[in-house]
Image (cartoon, rainbow, N blue to C red):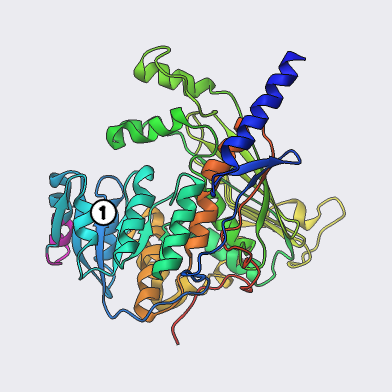
Amino acid sequence: MKRILIVIALAALAFSCTSQDPYGYVIKDNKIVYNVPPRPADQQSMLGFKCDPIENVRVGFVGLGMRGPGAVSRFCYIDDATVVALCDLFEDRVESAQKILEKHGRPRAEGYWGEEGYKQLCEREDIDLVYLAVPWQLHTPIAVYAMEHGKHVAIEVPAATSIKECWDLVNTSERTRRHCMMLENCCYDFFELTCLNMVQQGLFGEVVHVEGSYCHNLEPYWDQYQGDWRMRYNREHSGDVYPTHGIGPVCQDLNIHRGDKMDLLVSMGTDAFKGQETADSRYGKGAYNYANGDNTSTIIRTHNGKTILIEHSVVTPQPYSRMYQVQGTEGFANKYPVEGLALGSAVPKDVSIYDLDAEEYMSDAAREALMNEYQHPITKEGGLAEKAKTVGGHGGMDFIMDYRLIYCLHNGLPLDQDVYDAAEWSSLVELTEVSIEHGSMPVVMPDFTRGEWNKTEGLSFAMAE
């Protein structure tokens, strides 16, 4: 009886502590229900938003530690963009990035450093786009500051680490009329792009279930994160703290907020077996209680009756995997651990009842022929696929992402990813943690479009006339 009273008291406390928070939640009918604040009168939806064409996109980079230098190098291959400013906490990193520009025959940029150097960069009048590659916890504050100063922003993943930050991005973008794109590069990998085209061409029939993940043993990389910020985040938070590589591509397959929306989420994590062992090894036995489970699994149901499985695992030894799986009424695609396509009646072949065509992957030759046939139109444009593979960046997908960002700004087109994508995909950081903390209680996902999730008919990548 005492235990029951304690549970009731804790539930009441959770209800009373969060119900007054405009970005918080209440517990109703055994579900966690987040508030969706009404759109202020001075804001407009950013669905389909496009700005005036920018002849030459002037870019300022903030964060030159791990991913920033690669982005600076890639931008040297984009004709309609100029790097005008560089910023980092440390002056020597700024100078290293200057050498990248010089190597490519580009002029040196204005340099800024220190904890508030980004403010000086954002306050410049000659910058159109601020490109952020800083620790997760700084993504939203700097992005908001940049938009407040009239800049479009591109933010490394995840764009936000809390529901409040997700709303901060949405509200600031809507109010300032500035693009806010999360740099989800996995949406631009060749397999995912081709499968997206196949989905849109109906090759898989009705897509009913998709899967994505970030399963990557980070043991060799923990020390590379300035100030130990990534390990600290994992040891202090449960849930899927890095969901967007998995959720991004499959949300595009399902037309999330373009005809469907994520309705309900349930998340569950293992205990921190290897995680605690890793923390004990790094900091001393018992110095910290490692919060995040070794594996987190999240299942999401959409309004249109589809399901999504997302997983996160970064401490156990295993081959790298983003899973990426598409199940449809007429076919199936899978990227990890092996790339494979299995189609039903869409690809006729002579089979017996004991060798049904969709019960095994098609041959490598047949798959390659089909992938070539359904290559996504944006990678065909001007030989982009070949150039991307030459320039590089995770096999070329980073360059395609950067190229498309500048292409859309240069031509005054809607971006491939909008601020609602950034908010929806990043929201899993908090939503999965809250679900786990409440015994894997279902979470009713907030609608960041404020009821406009079905006003756009399908995902499309804009192309200039």
Q: Residue at x 62, y 71 (%)?
A: 458
Tell how many labels: 1
Q: Quadrant of the N terminus?
A: top right
- Foreground pick, 455 / 78: 455
Residue 188 in view (yes/no):
no
Magenta-drawn segment: 98-107
The three-letter amino acid code for the residue at tag 1 is: Val
Instruction: Tell me the element at label 1.
Output: strand
- Foreground pick, 254 / 357: 254
- Foreground pick, 150 / 290: 150
In the rendered image, which residue does mark 1 sit on? 62
Q: Is residue 13 left or right of residue 398?
A: right
Residue 154 in the image, given as x and y percentages of width and height: 37, 60
Q: Is residue 321 left or right of residue 258?
A: left
Q: Main secondary structure of the magenta part?
A: helix
Tell whether position 104 is magenta. yes
Is residue 304 depicted above or below 322 in this figure? Answer: below
Residue closest to the far right = 353
Residue 139 in the image, given as x and y percentages of width and height: 37, 50
- Foreground pick, 94 / 136: 136
Quadrant of res 195 = bottom right
Q: Residue at x 64, y 70 (%)?
A: 200
Residue 65 in view (yes/no):
yes
Residue 324 in the image, given as x and y percentages of width and height: 59, 51
Q: Quadrant of the C terminus?
A: bottom left
Q: Residue at x 34, y 46 (%)?
A: 138
Residue 51 in the image, given as x and y percentages of width and height: 39, 77
Q: Residue at x 66, y 68 (%)?
A: 259
